[in-house]
Amino acid sequence: MKKIALCLAFVVLSGMVSAQDIDVQIQQALDDLAVHRSAPATVSITPPVINGTHSVSAFSRYLYGKTLQYARSSSRYRVQPLRRGLPAQPPAGEQSALIQGSYRRTGNDLAITLSLVSEHDGAVLASTSFTTTIAELEALNLNILPENRETEAEAQDHEAMFDPPMALPGPSDPSGFFADAWPNEDSRTYFNGDNMTINLYASRDSYVKVYHIGADNQLQLIYPNRIDTDNSLKANTGRAIPENTSFVLGAPYGEETIYAVFSDRPFENLEEEMQSPVPAERGALSRAASRRGLTVQLNTPDEAAPGEQITTAWFHYTILPASLVEETFSYPKPEDVSQAVDALRTEILSQGGLFSGNDREGLYSLGDMSGSYRVSADEFIITVIQPPFSPAAPFPSGARSAGGAYSFFFNAPANIPAALAMVQTAIERNGGVFSGDTSAGLFRVSGIRGNYHVADRVSITIHEKPFVISYQLIEKEIKNYFGIR
C-alpha cells in the first residue's frame, strides 16, 4: 500500500526536471519529437522493446500506456490505430509515422529512447533519449525484463532464433506473398487470466499452421487442432483464431512467441505435430533440410517444395502476474465534509458506479475498481483498489480521469515568487515535480498533473487526476492554499 499526502502547491526547481519522475520525462520526450513539426503528426504507437529485440515487459506496458495517453491528449499528434496486414495507402498528403521506443540498462540506470519513424520508408524523423533509475522502477514494481529472462543478453540470444533467415518478408518480396500475425493486445502484454486471440493475414489464398513457444521454452502446434481443423485463409481477408473462443493465458509467466507458417499448398503430417510439446531449442527453429522432414522444425521461405510458396510471420508477447494495486490518497479534512462526500458520490454515480456511505465512511465500486473512504479528525482518506496498470489507466497512479481537461482561475496573490518559495520544501518532501517559473509551468503531485499560467490571474488546467477525486475538490484545495475562500 502506498499513502500519498496531498500537497497542491508549486515549486521552482533549478535546472532540469528530476530524473526520478518518469511521467514528466515521457511527456517531455513526446513534446521534443514533435517540436519542429509545423502540423500535428499522424502517428501510431508501438510497444517499447528491450534494446536489440522485440521483447516486451511490465515496463514496456507502462511506457506504452503513458505514450499513448499523452499523445492522445496532445495537440501535436493525431493518433491512429496500428495498420495491420498489407499496409494500406494513407490519404493523399498524409505523412504517417510510428512512435517507437527501446530501452537498455546502463549500470543503475535505464536509458530510454523514443523515435518518430516514417511509416512509409522507415526513416527516423526525430529521436530523443532520457534516463531513469532502476531503483525508481523497482519502487513502482516495473520489471524491465520478462519473468523468464534474467538479463538483456538472454533476451537477445532468444531473439537470435528469429533473425534472418527467419526475418519477415515484406510486401516488396519478389514472390509477392506477404503475411502478418498479431495479437489482440497492441501492447503485447497480458496478465494472468487474460484472453488472447491471434489475427492472421495473407496476401494470397493460403494454408496456415501456428506454433506456440511457451515461457517454459516448449514448442507445440496449436493451430490447426482437433477442434479447429480448417486452416485455410482467404487472400486479403483477416481471420482471428481460435474462433468462437480464445486462449486463456496463465503461469508460467514471461515471454512467449507465436510463429505462423503460410503456404499456398496444404501441409502434410499435421496429426503428428499435434502431439506433446518438444523443447524449443535453437535447432528446432533452424532451417530444416527438407519440408517433409522433422515435423517440429519450422519451414522458412527458401525451404519450399518445387513450385510452392511459403512465408512466415511471428510475434513475441509477455504474460505478467496478476495482482491488485492499492493506493491511499490523504487530503486535509474539508471544511464541509458533507459537500466533499457528495462530490465523491456524484463522481462515482455519474460514471455508472455504486456508492454507499455517510459523512464518516463508505464504500464504492466502479468497473473493475473499488475502494473506500473515511473521515478522521483532520484527514479525508480515499483508498483505490484496482487491477494492475493498463494503457487505459496506467499503473501505479490509480485510475485516471479520461477525456478533456478541467480549467479554473483566480486572482493572483500579491507576491507570486514568495508563494512559490514557501512550498518548495513541502512539494519536494511529498515527491512532487514542477518545471516552470513565475509566469508558467507544469506540475505533478499526488496523482494530479496539470499546468499553470500567471498574469493578473492564476489559470490552472488539470489534465490527469485520481478518477474518484472530483475536480471540484481539487479546485477547492488549490484555492484554499492561495487564500481564496
Image: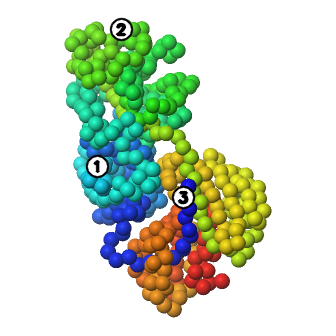
Mark 3 near mark 1, Cβ–Cβ under 8 Å? no
Residue at screen point 30% across, 41% down: 151
- Can you say which quadrant of the picture contains the N terminus? bottom right
Mark 2 near mark 1, Cβ–Cβ under 8 Å? no
Q: Nearer the viewer, residue 171 or 284?
A: 284
The answer to whether residue 110 is left or right of residue 378 is: left
Residue at screen point 29% across, 19% down: 284
- Can you say which quadrant of the picture contains the C terminus? bottom right
Q: Secondary structure at mark 2?
A: loop
Q: Nearer the viewer, mark 3 or mark 1?
A: 3
Question: Which residue in the protein does label 2 denote?
Answer: 268
Hey, what amino acid is under mark 3?
Lys
Mark 3 crowd level (few <14, some 14–19, many ≥20, 10 Å Cα): few
The answer to whether residue 169 is left or right of residue 18 is: left
Residue at screen point 34% across, 77% down: 14
Hey, what amino acid is under mark 2?
Glu
Image quadrant in which you'd find residue 383: bottom right
Mark 2 crowd level (few <14, some 14–19, many ≥20, 10 Å Cα): few
Question: Which residue in the protein does label 3 denote?
Answer: 2
Could you tell me residue 293's position as x and y percent? Answer: 27, 9
Could you tell me residue 145's position as x and y percent? Answer: 36, 43
Q: CA distance from mark 2 to mark 1?
A: 43 Å
Q: Is residue 140 above or below residue 228?
A: below
Residue at screen point 43% across, 42% down: 187
The tag earlier along the polypeptide, 2 or 1, is 1
Hey, what amino acid is under mark 1?
Arg
Q: Which mark is residue 104?
A: 1
Q: Which mark is residue 471?
A: none
